[in-house]
Amino acid sequence: MHKPSALALLLLTTPALAAGPDYKAVAERVVGQVAGVQEGEVVLITAPDTDQELATQLSWAIRRKKADSLTSIYREKDGRRYVDEVPAELDSLPPTASLKLLDIIQVQLGVDHTENPALFKDVPEARKLALGAASTPIADAAKKKGVRSVNIGNGLYPTDWLAKRYGMKKAELERLFWSSVDVDYAKLAVSGDAVKAALVGKQLKVTSASGTDLTVSIDKRPVVVSDGIISDADKKQGGAALQVWLPAGEVYLVPVAGSAEGKVVYPRAFVEDTELTDLTFTFKAGKVVDVQAKKGLDAFKKIYDAAPAGKEELGYLDLGINPALIAPKGSKLQSWVSAGTVSIGIGNNQWAGGTNAAPGGFAGHLNDTTVTVDGKVIVDKGVLKVGAGGAG
């Protein structure tokens, strides 16, 4: 992997702050360094209408690489409008256009302006699952073809509703988001490789003062590093290694099926517009056998109970390694990538290289855990102990 160029994804801290990040610099880095777009390739860009400037700069950066692009723009609340205006029986129609596009593209660049999940609170769970399942053929085909994918957002793209959820001002979330994208990917790769090496072993254990006490087998399980660059080695590896989420900084794996024993306690979690307290999964032989929560259990059970088999299987463990994403004091911010964060998910794990294709699932984030592999400490009470970090 190559040391990043001087192109910085700076959210300006001068009076020009209102102008936001330098989208031209963002586009150059995403196209040239992250995705590694090559001459003659075709790239699909998807973005909301609120970020057309970023989409435009991405298309121009692609052109400067002597490559070509297609841009798909969507509007906020389009997903909700679809549910209201298109009959449910049409949800299962084959995604013909998207599958045809995969015949000509080599790269996907997506700006992940996630819609407020509260907008879908009154949508029947069966329909949500059907809509989720409808995208599976696209993901399968993209994986088979080896399409490289870059997601700009990683669940943190600054929106009014997300800032409100986390008890932050949107401008504060924007600064944190772009500064977390603006890391030295070469250093992040070094840190990621160190954590990957530390995850070679037989038994991984996660404990916390909040009550988490989980043991899983990781013997001979492949480990994937998302360090912000799709390298030549990643292209050769294929599968999960061909995708990057920005802000970057994750090392993840799929444990041995059926090996999870114990419990996971998420002190804070979110389901649609409901905040849950002490959501607790008890695992036996790799599956959730009991779900409890001090607050918000009904909201979780409404979704969980409607999902088909496979939702109850432990899906993956993900360790954050990005030192730039530090939650502001007093906020409720959660992320995949904060250094020392442990994310544990159930259900679908195909994105992580697993084989569970169930349309249901849940991912939660833990900030106070201790993680050991065969007794060696990887994370100590929320502090990453392996790797040099990746701050730029």
Image: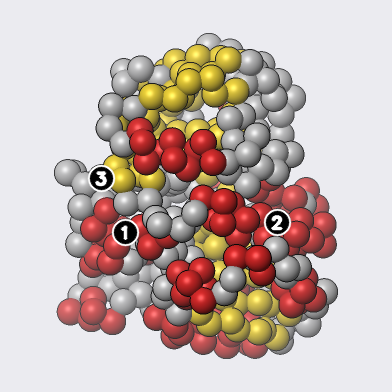
Query: Which image quarter is the N terminus in?
Result: bottom right
The residue identified by callout 1 is 162
- 20 relative to 364, above or below: below
Residue occupying the point 61% across, 29% down: 313
Residue 293 is labelled as none
- Give, as a three-letter code, the residue at label 1: Leu
Q: How is the image coloured?
A: secondary structure
What is the crowding at mark 2: few (fewer than 14 residues within 10 Å), some, or many (at least 20)?
Answer: some
- Nearest to the observer: residue 303 or residue 383: 303
| Residue 136 tag number | 2
> In the rendered view, does 149 fall on the left or right side of 304?
right
Which numbered disc flags the more N-terminal residue, 2 or 1? Answer: 2
Q: Is residue 26 left or right of residue 66?
A: left
| Mark 2 vs mark 1: in front | 2
How many circles with numbers are drawn on the protein?
3
Cα–Cα span, label 3 and label 2: 32 Å
